[in-house]
Image (cartoon, rainbow, N blue to C red):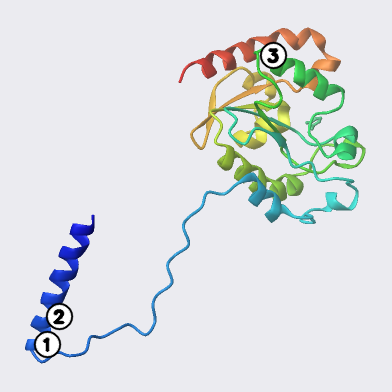
């Protein structure tokens, strides 16, 4: 290494002496050194959360208690996306912690994963009053942040829970009964819609179909 530097210095000296011999005794030096572009650091979930801030982009901020950003593993291979926070989620600031959430936890565990290993988010991050359906302007305001979360996590598979999640992610108005269990794609990520856990609480006889969808997901996760 030292040898290389000595050689470089010697070459430089020879070159400068050559220039001197040519009558060139000064060298132009840029008086403005252009700033280096900052290294393009990858976005993190913390960056997305910071950008979201104390969001007031839609009317739901007036009635919500807490923004439910999402939680789980930033490097998850599997992401669950529900509809929006309910009462318990709004109080606790965490997704899927009420009765439907407890069922989702069981669904996740049915394929030998834990909540900590996956990432859980919703189409909208604030509870609609009286748990009404999310409105198009609310979905539209929230969607850029969900998409950023998806791009940070880059899961292999997204399991879309219920009508709003599946229809929003897949930009379709096809019914969930027709969408569920089939494989779709969003920005190179596999998307499998299934029924929402809250729907299963009201219609337990549909659990078998969700079980089948989860088996499909488990198999996809097994393949590299
Ligand atoms: N239902 C949802 O869609 N999301 C939650 O976080 C809770 C219930």
| Image-based side of 56 in relation to 12, left or right | right
Q: Nearer the viewer, mark 2 or mark 3?
A: 2
Q: Which mark is residue 16?
A: 2
Does label 2 point to a residue whose CB lies under 8 Å from ligand 1?
no
- Inter-mark Cα distance, 2 to 1: 6 Å
Q: Quadrant of ligand 1?
A: top right
Tell me residue 59's x, y (percent).
83, 53
Q: Quadrant of residue 96?
A: top right
User: Which residue in the protein does label 1 denote?
Assistant: 20
Which comes sooner in the sequence, label 2 or label 3? 2
Quadrant in which the N terminus appears: bottom left
- Inter-mark Cα distance, 2 to 3: 76 Å
Secondary structure found at label 1: helix
Mark yes or no: residue 198 visible: no
Q: Which mark is residue 210?
A: 3
Quadrant in which the C terminus appears: top left
Question: Is 102 or 12 nearer to us in this picture?
Answer: 12
- Inter-mark Cα distance, 1 to 3: 82 Å
Q: Quadrant of residue 121?
A: top right
- Mark 1 is surrounded, within 10 Å at the Cα level, by few (under 14), some (14 to 19) or many (20 or more) other residues, namely few
Tell me residue 15's x, y (percent).
12, 76
Which residue is at a point 71% across and 38% down the rendered structure image? 123
Q: Tell me if residue 149 comes above or below residue 164 in the rendering.
A: below
| Image-based side of 42 in relation to 120, left or right | left
């Amino acid at each position: 290494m030292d040898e290389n530097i000595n050689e470089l210095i010697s070459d430089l000296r020879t070159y400068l002496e050559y220039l001197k011999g040519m009558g060139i005794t000064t060298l132009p030096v840029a008086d403005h050194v252009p700033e280096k572009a900052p290294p393009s650091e990858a976005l993190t979930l913390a960056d997305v959360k910071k950008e979201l801030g104390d969001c007031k982009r839609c009317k739901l901020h007036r009635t919500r208690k807490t923004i439910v950003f999402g939680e789980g593993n930033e490097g998850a291979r599997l992401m669950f996306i529900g509809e929006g926070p309910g009462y318990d989620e709004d109080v606790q600031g965490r997704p899927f912690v009420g009765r439907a959430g407890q069922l989702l936890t069981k669904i996740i565990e049915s394929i030998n994963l834990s909540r900590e290993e996956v990432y859980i988010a919703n189409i909208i991050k604030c509870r609609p009053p009286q748990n009404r359906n999310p409105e198009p302007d609310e979905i539209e305001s929230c969607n850029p942040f969900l998409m950023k979360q998806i791009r940070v996590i880059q899961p292999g598979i997204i399991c879309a829970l219920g009508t709003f999640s599946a229809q929003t992610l897949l930009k379709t108005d096809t019914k969930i009964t027709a969408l569920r269990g089939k494989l779709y794609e969003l920005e190179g990520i596999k998307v499998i819609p299934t029924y929402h856990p809250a729907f299963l609480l009201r219609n337990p006889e549909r659990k078998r179909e969700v079980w089948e969808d989860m088996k499909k997901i488990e198999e996809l996760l097994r393949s590299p």
